Image (cartoon, grey):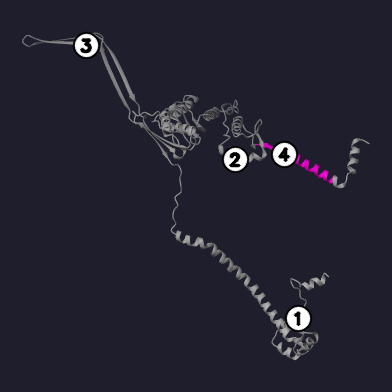
Amino acid sequence: MNGFGRLLLRWSSLPRAARLIAGTTALLMCGLAIAATIVEHPARVALFPAPLHAEQLAEIEERLAGWNVSFTPAADNIIVDAARRSDLLLRLSLAGVPHPHLSSTGEALASVGVLTPQSVVDAQTRAGLAGDIEAGLRGVDGVDDARVIVAPAKAAEFADEEAHAASASVRLRLRSGARLSRAAVAGIRAFVAASVPALEASHVTILDDSGAALDDSGPSTDDGADLQRSLQSALDMAFGYGATIVRVRAEYDSRHSSERDVRRTPLGAPAIKRVRRSESYDGQGKRYRQVEEGEDRGSETHESLAESPSGSLMRVCAAVFVDQGRAIDLVKVRELATATLGYNALRGDTLAVEAVDFRHDPVARRDPWWLLYGAIVPLLPALVLATGLVFCARLAAPPIGLLARSLVDRAAVDRASKTAAGFAPARVRSMLAAEPPHAAAAIISALPAATATAVLDLYPPHEREAIVHRMQRRQSPLLQDAEEILRRHA
């Protein structure tokens, strides 16, 4: 006999209870092992139902890595846990990831053949060029997405037509809370102009997601916002988030001024220039002669030109609110704000640092019915209890009345039975003349057998049948008497 047979024989020799316990334990262990395997290695599915492009995969992988989410990259998709797929899709959609795929110039011209018309080739080229520009603008700080439309230059083919220069329109979708500085707008304009042949920077129009045109030629209004963000971030890192509130307002000079200064210095001691003039009359005033001699000895000229364009920063006004409950040194906050903002008292800058209580205790508004509420609220439990008692009394009144009536009837029957026990049958009949059949049956049942028979004989036949019918009715009380219980179980 081999080892398996001996093991099977030994298993058969075990008691049935032991085999049942061992089998149940083995099944439980297998179930726990399977459950642990499923928990440790959950089902994994593709994150997106459609294949993704390379830049979309890179964008999603970067975002999932930032969220500390485990994933497995595939050739055209991302493999994640099946239980977290819906949650990840929701978080990615709220974050605007992934961005739509942009066709590059190579992809746009991939379908161009030898017989493709030139107009189609030009349109495909412009579409691919716009995609390349949009992909480049996505990497700009503060820009979430971009849309570029390129209009090519058009030459005047006929005498009555006008030529049009190339132009481009750029629509930017900025990230939440982001603002582009004047230098960033100028850089985007130059980038788009350099990407399109024969396109000048002045023919590039840039819009933000609110529809406002971004211009880099007007006065700058970004210094105040930049200074405010810089100071707010510094104070948050130094004293904790929510300890301070910073507001900065920058004022700009809208005047354009120009000042020119020219100075000439002689090369030697004599004057720079000398002019001699002489006049003479001859022949009794008939001849007039004028002689003018000039001498220029040379000079050194110094010319300076100072221009102040419009939009230059005139002064900065800043206010720093400090939480009074944090016990922060206001002197240190003022010194940090002065250094961060570049405070200049000669320019007219102002800086205010004050401790303010950030707590907002709600003010209780007195209701016009507060007296009525004060009277009702203390009495409300008693009113609820009284209402409940009245409701219960109304529900219990009919059964209680019926029970009381039955008890009264039973007591009357008992008294009548005891009273009629010593009377003659004729007198008992006269006593029961006004009683209904059920009362007469109860009283007659308590009389001795001979007296009960004599009393029944005195009744008319129809009344006797009604009384006898009630005397023979089987009673089934809810609670049996103690004597009946003892009799049954004796």
Element carrying mark 1 = helix
Label 3 and label 2: CA atoms lie apart by 86 Å
Q: Give the range drawn in magenta.
A: 19-46
Dividing the picture into quadrants, the one containing residue 443 is bottom right
Q: Is 21 inside the magenta-drawn segment?
A: yes
Q: In the rendered image, which quarter contains the N terminus? A: top right
Question: Residue 165's x, y, as percent?
Answer: 44, 27
Residue that label 2 marks: 90
C-alpha gap between disc 2 and disc 1: 80 Å
Residue at the spot x=51%, y=63% of the render?
A: 379
Assign a secondary structure to mark 2.
helix
Decide which of 305, 339 is in the foreground and name it: 339
Given residues 282 and 131, the one toward you in this image is: 131
Say above or below: 490 vs 265.
below
Disc sitting over residue 38 in the figure: 4
Residue tagged 1: 470
